[in-house]
Image (cartoon, grey):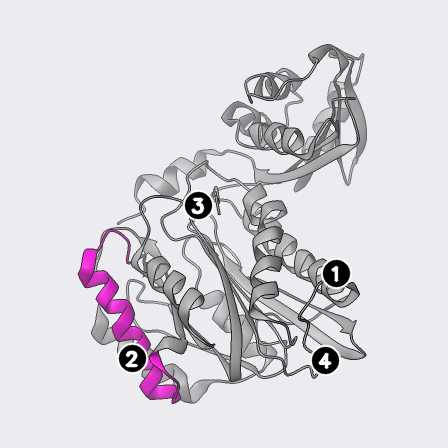
């Protein structure tokens, strides 16, 4: 397995385009189009928020009922959430516009939106954007990167990755792009992720691979604890790698799952590390747990603790906040057996042993916590299970960004 340059256009047969449609932003591109030269098997996972955006409802139906999918239309600036029947109708109108421009059925078009909740889409601009993008479709690294940039809202940088593996004697590529910076606490922020592959695989196994993998990737990140109305991960497979179709679990399926995990974990970490206003990616590893469920509960409790996030921003080794967050998580453990470490590119330091502080150097701890990527490792000494969660520090700028987001 190797990481290669590119993103959503890296796999054979996939193209992308972007356009400045003026949906909300007046100085940048705000629409993207992903297209496969051939029909794809489609899979998706979506927000569990009871308040679901119209594009989530549309995509759930398409993924479940359509024989194949071939295109994805994405807009930034307006989420098309809490927009009633009118908003859902706009999903249909968007799919119809793409159908006419690309020569594919409406039921082969997925849609996604991100931005302000409660506003209706300006359909004249959406349709014009689709018409602009269709003739611009290219399978280049550049077109994929521009598409990744066009779907950003408060993101500070584009997020994409691609990997290659050998499956069934063929080179298989998996690439993806995502956006997410605030309202990030997936439960399958506003987070959107689009992954493409030229693998040949059954629809059932494609969906199972995605549904299982998000548990350890997108569902293990948190910026602010807010589960969005629009969380969507879409996975398209067009079979153009030429491998024998994967129809049952085995070695080939396992290889694909490992590669998919690398793509999804990379994208998830890019979102966590670009949390609104943040200065550091904060990683939490819980090891020595009695069960995976216990490790997940503990790690997510730490990563969502505002007091812990504030301490990371202040480069303060305030380990009591971490132990406290573990204590109210609902998971049972013995606090007098916990060891805690901080580590980064600047080194590794054991802070507590068996629940009691060690005579560590505060200066060394501050140096370790001043890096752009910081890890806390909690060993609860109960078994062999482990889990990793990702988040970020909590800064003054988070409040500033969200205080006037609509304006």
Of the numbered discs 4 and 3, the one sitting upstream in the chain is: 3
Report the side of 28 relative to 356 (left or right).
Answer: left
Q: Residues within 10 Å of mark 2 (few under 14, many from 20)?
A: some
x and y, in percent, of residue 16 in the image: 50, 78
Residue annotated with mark 1: 254
Q: Element under label 2?
A: helix
Tell me what residue is drawn at x 40 percent, y 56 percent. Answer: 153
Q: From the viewer's perspective, is the residue at label 1 or at label 3 nearer? A: 1
Tell me what residue is drawn at x 73 percent, y 19 percent. Answer: 362
Q: Residues within 10 Å of mark 1 (few under 14, many from 20)?
A: few
Residue annotated with mark 2: 96
Tell me what residue is drawn at x 37 percent, y 39 percent. Answer: 400
Q: Nearer the viewer, residue 49 or 402?
A: 49
Q: From the viewer's perspective, is the residue at label 2 or at label 1 nearer? A: 1
Mark 2 vs mark 1, CA separation in Å: 37 Å
The magenta segment is 80-106
For the residues labelled 1 and 3, say whether their Cβ atoms are less than 8 Å apart. no
Report the side of 63 relative to 15 (left or right).
Answer: left
For the residues labelled 2 and 3, say whether their Cβ atoms are less than 8 Å apart. no
Tell me what residue is drawn at x 68 percent, y 17 percent. Answer: 333
x and y, in percent, of residue 378 in the image: 72, 26
Residue annotated with mark 3: 182
Residue annotated with mark 4: 243
Mark 4 vs mark 1, CA separation in Å: 15 Å
Q: Quadrant of residue 14?
A: bottom right
Q: Element under label 4?
A: loop
């Amino acid at each position: 397995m190797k990481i290669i340059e590119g993103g959503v256009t890296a796999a054979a047969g996939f193209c992308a385009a972007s356009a400045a449609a003026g949906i909300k932003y007046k100085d940048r591109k705000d629409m993207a189009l992903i297209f496969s030269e051939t029909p794809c098997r489609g899979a998706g996972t979506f927000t569990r928020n009871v308040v679901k955006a119209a594009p989530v409802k549309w995509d759930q139906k398409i993924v479940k009922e359509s024989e194949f999918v071939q295109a994805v239309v994405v807009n930034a600036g307006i989420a098309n959430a809490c927009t009633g029947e009118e908003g859902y109708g706009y999903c249909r109108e968007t799919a119809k516009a793409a159908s006419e421009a690309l020569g594919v059925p409406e039921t082969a078009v997925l849609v996604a939106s991100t931005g302000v909740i409660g506003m209706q889409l300006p359909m004249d601009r959406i349709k014009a954007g689709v018409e602009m993008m269709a003739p611009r479709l290219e399978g280049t690294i550049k077109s994929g990167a521009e598409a990744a940039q066009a779907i950003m809202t408060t993101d500070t940088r584009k997020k994409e990755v691609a990997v290659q593996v050998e499956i069934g004697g063929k080179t298989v590529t998996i690439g993806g792009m995502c956006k997410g910076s605030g309202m990030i606490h997936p439960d399958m922020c506003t987070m959107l992720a689009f992954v493409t592959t030229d693998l040949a695989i059954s629809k059932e196994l494609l969906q199972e691979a995605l549904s299982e993998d998000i548990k350890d990737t997108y569902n293990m990140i948190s910026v602010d604890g807010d589960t969005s109305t629009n969380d969507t991960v879409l996975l398209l497979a067009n079979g153009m790698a030429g491998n024998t179709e994967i129809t049952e679990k085995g070695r080939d399926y396992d290889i694909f799952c490992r590669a998919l995990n690398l793509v999804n974990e990379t994208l998830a970490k890019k979102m966590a590390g670009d949390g609104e206003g943040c200065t550091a990616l904060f990683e939490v590893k819980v090891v020595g747990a009695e069960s995976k469920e216990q490790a997940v509960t503990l790690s997510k409790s730490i990563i969502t603790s505002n007091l812990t996030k504030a301490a990371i921003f202040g480069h303060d080794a305030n380990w009591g906040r971490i132990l406290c967050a573990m204590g109210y998580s609902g998971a049972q453990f013995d606090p007098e057996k916990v060891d805690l470490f901080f580590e980064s590119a600047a080194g590794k330091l054991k802070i507590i042993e068996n629940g009691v502080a060690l005579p560590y150097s505060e200066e060394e701890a501050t140096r370790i916590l001043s890096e752009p990527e910081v890890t806390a490792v909690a060993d609860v000494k109960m078994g062999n299970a482990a889990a990793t969660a990702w988040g970020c520090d909590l800064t003054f700028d988070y409040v500033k960004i969200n205080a006037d987001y609509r304006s």
